[in-house]
Amino acid sequence: MWRPILLIGLIVAIFILAIIFGVGEKLGALREWIQSLGVLGPAVFVGLYILGVVAGIPGSALTVAAGGLFGSLLGVILVSLASTIGASFSFLIARYFARGAIANWLSKREKFKSLDVMTEEHGAMIVAITRLIPVFPFNLLNYGFGLTKIPFWTYVFWSWLCMLPGTVLYVVGVDAVIQLIVQRKVPWILLGVIAGVGVLLVVLVKFAHRKIKF
């Protein structure tokens, strides 16, 4: 019980500090500056995100930033596009360009030893489940799938589809908090989207647990 209580307390503390230090005005100005760059702003963001995924850098910070800089709709589109392209590049690098080195690298990690067997037995379902349930680190998983026999476009489609709920939760959640801070009003529509996607994600994860036990 202490985890949700801690999370709620942290959000309340951030909201109070944001009001005290005038963070709302600064965030509004930053968003306006990004928007003033036109197509260059989103393009730079997507490029940095792709490079981060290929380099193995966690993309959670940029995912969170997308909600504040671009809002819910554009933020989800950009993060979904960038994370899928980055994951695809990592897959292709592992499969065609650095297979030996990456195989030696991942073989030292116990969780990846059974990935090839599970993928061969269950195919696309393993891609879907591992994107929904954080059993494996996201960036390492991209390279790990490149060493399996999963078809490339199957990997791309199920990665995109099953990363989307988490992307929506992160980006829309941050946008909702920022609207609360900047505009001082509750964004009920965004909260409804978060609740709906959250319920969907819980149902999908429970289904995944029943289908395959890791």
Image (spheres, rainbow, N blue to C red):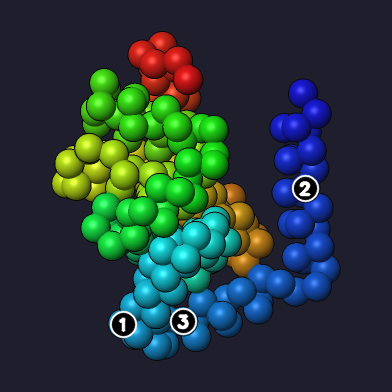
* Residue at disc 1, secondary structure: loop
Determine which residue is flagged by label 1: 39
Question: From this viewpoint, is residue 167 visible?
Answer: no
Which residue bears the numbered disc 2? 10
Question: With 179 as the anchor, is 198 left or right in this view?
Answer: left
Q: What residue type is labelled 1?
A: Val
Question: Residue 25: where, in percent of width, then height?
Answer: 65, 77
Q: Residue at x 40, y 88 (%)?
A: 37
Element type at mark 2: helix
For disc 3, the marked residue is 34
Three-letter code for the amino acid on which mark 3 is drawn: Ile
The residue at the point 45 percent across, 15 percent down is: 213
The front one of 138 and 144 is 144
Does residue 99 lie above or below 71 as drawn?
above
What amino acid does circle 2 point to?
A: Leu
Q: Position of residue 51 (x, y in %)?
A: 42, 70
**Front-most of 185 and 123?**
123
